[in-house]
Amino acid sequence: MLSLETLSHDQITQIRYVLTDIDDTVTTEGRLTGEAYLAIERLTRAGFTVIPITGRPAGWCDHFARMWPVYAVVGENGAFYFRYDSHARKMHSHYWASAEHRAENRLKLNQLANNILASVPGCALASDQDYRQADLAIDFCEDVPPLPEADVQRIVNMFEAVGAQAKISSIHVNGWFGHYDKLSMTKTLFAREFNLSLEQNLDKVLFIGDSPNDEPMFGFFDYSVGVANIQTQLHRLHDRPKYVTTSKGGSGFVEMANHILSFRGQKN
């Protein structure tokens, strides 16, 4: 991984879209700092299209899309995207699976949740599970004492044993039925909203994240950035980010924003 500082003027001046994970990328130890939120605002005001790409639930993503200075949000690791039209006062949404299929999958996920909770002591349903529409989130360190690595992997294995996808974030193991992830829904969003192929516009997009569920994005984008706490997740990654910040969490996000904004004549 290269230092973020090596991302040059010529590269940065081509960037139009900033895609970002939220937990432990924009947030720091579970909190959204004023500096990090202001960095999103500054990027948007400077003309960048900012889109969070998160594992957080639909209920939270409705809030992000409505209230944050962002264009849209991809949620539940690619299950959907939401875009709020403030002029029309209308939420636009696109889901990977139909409502019928989501309901069928929920029944299977509920049974799987019972099995995981009974088999892996110390884990818990994520506190935001009630607000999810398409996936199951198992908490291994957000609101419970951190589980050993072997137990986290055991949760992943239980998802995969029944044909579900499973991704590890910095706080949860998220599982779902369906062949999608953060990258596939991001491609769908760009095609539907901007009539753009991501493959043909890699020089216009920067992604920043921190954990294994960001790996499809790290591997795909030329300008993929990890905040410094990605160092604790490298043993779980095959595809690493190309660049890394010196600061962790939200401070790393601010560092990234300051770096790319500096080439547009904006000071911190």
Image (tube, rainbow, N blue to C red):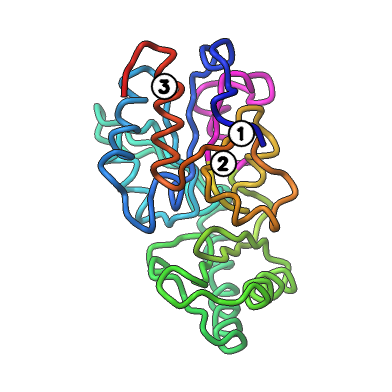
**Label 1 sits on what residue type?**
Tyr
| Image quadrant where residue 115 sits | bottom right
Q: In terms of depth relative to the viewer, which is nearer, 239 or 101? A: 239
Which residue is drawn at the image coordinates 41% and 21% (left, top)? Answer: 48
Q: Of marks 3 and 1, which one's residue comes earlier in the chain?
A: 3
Q: In terms of depth relative to the viewer, which is nearer, 201 or 99? A: 201
Q: Of marks 2 and 3, which one's residue comes earlier in the chain?
A: 3
Asked if residue 134 is positioned above or below residue 14 in the image, the reply reads below
Magenta span covers which residues? 183-208
- In front: mark 3 or mark 1? 1
Image location (x, y in percent) of residue 65: 34, 41
Asked if residue 242 is positioned above or below residue 47 in the image, the reply reads below
Q: Of marks 2 and 1, which one's residue comes earlier in the chain?
A: 2
Helix, strand or loop under label 1: strand
Image location (x, y in percent) of residue 28: 38, 52
Residue 48 - label: 3
Which residue is drawn at the image coordinates 44% and 52% (left, top)? Answer: 23
**C-alpha gap between disc 3 and disc 1:** 19 Å
The chief SS type of the magenta part is: helix
Residue at numbered disc 1:
243
Which residue is drawn at the image coordinates 55% and 87% (left, top)? Answer: 121
The 10 Å Cα crowd at callout 3, few under 14, some 14 to 19, many 20 or more, is many
Image location (x, y in percent) of residue 156: 67, 69
Image location (x, y in percent) of residue 230: 58, 49
**Label 3 sits on what residue type?**
Phe
**Label 2 sits on what residue type?**
Gly
Residue 226 - label: 2
Q: Where, quadrant-wise, is the N terminus in this rendering? A: top right
Residues marked 2 and 1 touching at CB (< 8 Å): yes
Asked if residue 88 is positioned above or below residue 119 in the image, the reply reads above
Residue 121 - label: none
**C-alpha gap between disc 2 and disc 1:** 6 Å
